[in-house]
Image (spheres, rainbow, N blue to C red):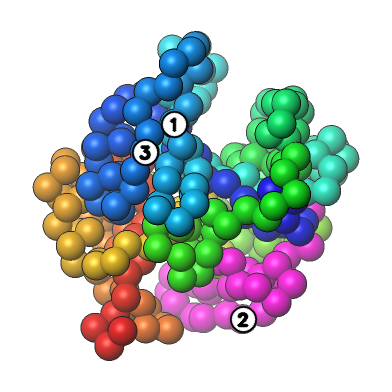
Amino acid sequence: MRNSQGTPIWYELQSADPDASKAFYDHVIGWTIEPQPSGDMDYRMIETGNGAVGGVMRLTPEMEAGGARPGWLFYVGVEDVDATAEAIKAAGGAVLMGAWTIPHIGRMAVVADPQGIPFYIMRGDSDSPSTAFERTGMGKCTWNELITPDQDAGDAFYRAIFGWNYPGIMSMGAMGDYRFIAVGDEQIGATMPHPGEGPPPGWRFYFRAPDIEAAAAKAIEAGGTVMMGPHDVPGGDRILVASDPHGVVFGVVGPGAAA
């Protein structure tokens, strides 16, 4: 997973009940999350039918006592984890868990931007690029959205650390600007101001499903809540924002009526 600097390479759901999370997301998105593996660590791969998109990690009582909460995080690929961690600290961010290496997987660290929003940085051992992020890949993450209390500072931070650029802006009126993010020429998501109410600031990830209306119905059926949508977005897709039964917020993307 030696993608270029600043590329999303993995998505991780931290869950206190991986069995319940498996039942929910398998039903709503169409994934196949593996059953609990043998051994001490409960980490389950999320399969899309066309490669993995990420994993589900069980939150232990010790992790929760340390401040960990159910939620989605992503791993951003970097050339040098240790140097990037130092750069993040120098830019006003924080290192929440210092760099460590998993043999045959890679080196990683848990960090946060200056607004306290967490994510991973990683340098994978595999020479094959990650395909967890694909704009049209079924079951894959197709959009990364930062909802932040300080959009200008956040954009400057990620530009300095990852070299991201912001090639376009869509006005949302009183809600502020929706600023698109690109790694080189590839658009990967957008940033927007936090509205001051609703879910806390953080990264929100949108996963592709074959039928957005069916995904909305399945989310409600499985004990989740549809918070926004489904509605059309530029480019011909339809989206929704929902929360799972544990209150974890996520997005779904599906084809529009004309697709």
In the image, is residue 97 part of the stretch drawn in magenta? no
Along the polypeptide, which appears first: circle 3 or circle 2? 3
**Is residue 157 something that shows in the picture?**
no
Query: Quick check: 196 above or below 113?
Result: below
Label 3: which residue? 33
- Neighbour class for label 3 at 10 Å: few (<14), some, many (≥20)? many
- In which quadrant of the rendered image does the C terminus lie? bottom left
- Residue in view at x 50 percent, y 43 percent: 54
Look at label 1 and name its amino acid. Answer: Arg
Rendered location of residue 226, percent (x, y) = 22, 55
Asked if marks 3 and 2 touch (Cβ < 8 Å), the reply is no
The kind of residue tagged 3 is Ile
Span shown in magenta: 161-189
Question: Left or right: 183 with respect to 89?
Answer: left
Question: For the residue marked with disc 2, what is the amino acid?
Answer: Gly
- In three-dimensional space, the C-alpha distance between marks 3 and 2, rounded to whole angstroms, equals 36 Å
Name the residue at the bottom extreme: 258
Which residue: 61% across, 81% down? 168
Q: In this rendering, would 159 be left or right of 258?
A: right
Task: Reply above or below: 258 against 43.
Answer: below
Q: Which residue is mark 1?
A: 44
Q: CA distance from mark 1 to mark 3?
A: 6 Å
Q: On the rendered structure, is 69 left or right of 83?
A: left
At label 1, counting other C-alpha atoms closer than 10 Å, the crowd grade (few under 14, some 14-19, many 20 or more) is many
Residue 210 placed where, x, y %?
A: 29, 66
Up the image or down, 157 lies above or below 244; here it is below
Q: Secondary structure at mark 3?
A: strand
- For label 2, the residue is 168
Instruction: Name the secondary structure under disc 1.
Output: strand
Q: Are marks 1 and 3 in contact (CB under 8 Å)?
A: yes
The answer to whether any part of residue 172 appears in the image is yes
* Front-lying residue, 257 or 49: 49
